[in-house]
Image: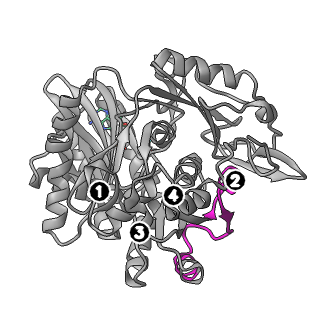
Amino acid sequence: MTYERNNGYIDGNTTHARATVERVATGSSAYPCAYAIIAPMKALLIGSGGREHALAWKLSRSPLLDRLVIAPGNPGTACYGQNTPIPPHDLTALVDLARREAVGLVVVGPENPLAAGLADRFQEAGIPVFGPTSAAARIESSKSFAKTLMNEANVPTAETHTFPDHIAATEFARRSGKAWVVKADGLALGKGVVVADDLSATLEAIARVGATYKGQHILLEERLYGRELSVLALCDGQRLLPLPPARDHKRLYDGDAGPNTGGVGAVAPVENVTPDLLDDIVSHCMQPVVDVLADRGSPFCGALYAGLMLTEQGPKVLEFNARFGDPETQVVLPLLEGDLLAAMLACAEGRLQSDLLTIRQGCAACVVLTAAGYPEQPRKGDPITGLETLKADDLLIFHAGTAWEDNRLVTAGGRVLGVTGLGSNLRAALDRTYAAISQIAFAGMHYRMDIGA
Ligand code: AMP
Ligand code: GLY
């Protein structure tokens, strides 16, 4: 284990992949020999958050990986490959980079480039990509499209009414005389949804959402009650391989108070989510939309994320995302055994098999350390201390909003670090996480004390 200038956490695995491939080639490895016949490859990972650091960490453990290139990456991903300063919205530069590096697989992290057609561009260039085309990614980028799919596929979800503008939505809400969940149709970084408690809050929310997301349709949705659950699954256009169920904490403060955020903590697996319940979710909530997308000629390849409410009538879908969740990925990936790169390549090539990844025993808990001013106006430039001493097999520290400045690691975004502890049960995982956090400091650092509670 070493600590290097470019990272907060390193597990000594930077050179692991190549060495393992060589061992496979000489036939002296414990890895399945099927891997030996696939040549080691370069991979390109797109994104710069905690999710991408977790993906880089897991991909770097693949015997198939020769070299990882990350665009643009962050100080954490730099431990596992070459960060390249190309932003996710520069589709042409990303395709050029993949060509130049002759990568064997591209993995797209964030939703915006997927909605903009980045996966289509790689497909057109003949480069295997793990991530849906823009037509399939509409399952996230248009909530009304997702509702249409769900209704067509008979997926349990909240009753919803869609309106072209705030005037029509207001008229409908007034006539109904009751409260609705108000949603903007398009991508809004989790900020386009208001769960209103009464009619006047509904009308206020319609006005606000209408003004903020001008030109977008507005959805009024029946409010569902229960506990929320995130189920992520790899998909090859036809088949799904579900990952351990996770629970995300979206509000900034303890007790689910304060503003909504992208997610400030997560745990996996989730208590009381039995294998039967997970099967039920996959077969009744997820597989049907995958089938409908394939029937429509836009098969979904990538990570399909179902945000669910466990209601008294059973699980119902709140939303779909067309990518890995963040911070869910930071707890889900550490619980996987097997070669994620091989599984993603199998998705891109339409040959996913359920035994490519298995789930290990134990629990993972991630607490996100946020910067002063998050989520409105996160402050940047506060020096971060304490990471040097934090190295252990049951601890992963994922960078999200960090940067190197004058040889110091400083805050550079709202969600600064994700601290993931592992343990044989949730309590042990949480204790590991909070013990590590007590060693880390930066001015304005904030985190929830009740993750997993
Ligand atoms: P969405 O982006 O649609 O998942 O909404 C963001 C958050 O709003 C969800 O994680 C829920 O906490 C909440 N939410 C969305 N839709 C509903 C609903 N129909 N009933 C209750 N809460 C909802
Ligand atoms: N953690 C919620 C999301 O990734 O959308």
In this view of the protein, which residue sits in the foreground, 86 or 340? 340
Can residue 214 be seen?
A: no
Q: Which mark is residue 79?
A: 2
In this view of the protein, which residue sits in the foreground, 163 or 376? 376
Q: On the image, which quarter does residue 298 sit in? A: bottom left
Neighbor class of circle 4 (other Cα within 10 Å; few <14, some 14-19, many 20+) is many
Q: Are marks 2 and 3 in contact (CB under 8 Å)?
A: no
Which residue does the image show at 65% across and 54% down from the upper left? Answer: 77
Q: Position of residue 212 (x, y in %)?
A: 46, 52
Q: Are marks 4 and 3 in contact (CB under 8 Å)?
A: no
Q: In front of the other: label 4 or label 3?
A: 3
Q: Which mark is residue 235?
A: 1
Q: Which residue is mark 4?
A: 63
Mark 2 → mark 3, Cα distance in angstroms: 27 Å
Label 4 secondary element:
loop
Figure quarter occupied by ligand 1: top left
Q: Which residue is mark 3?
A: 37
Mark 4 → mark 1, Cα distance in angstroms: 21 Å
Specify the amino acid type for callout 4.
Pro
Q: Which badge, 1 or 3, is on the more N-terminal residue?
A: 3
Label 3 secondary element:
helix
Q: Position of residue 246 (x, y in %)?
A: 39, 33
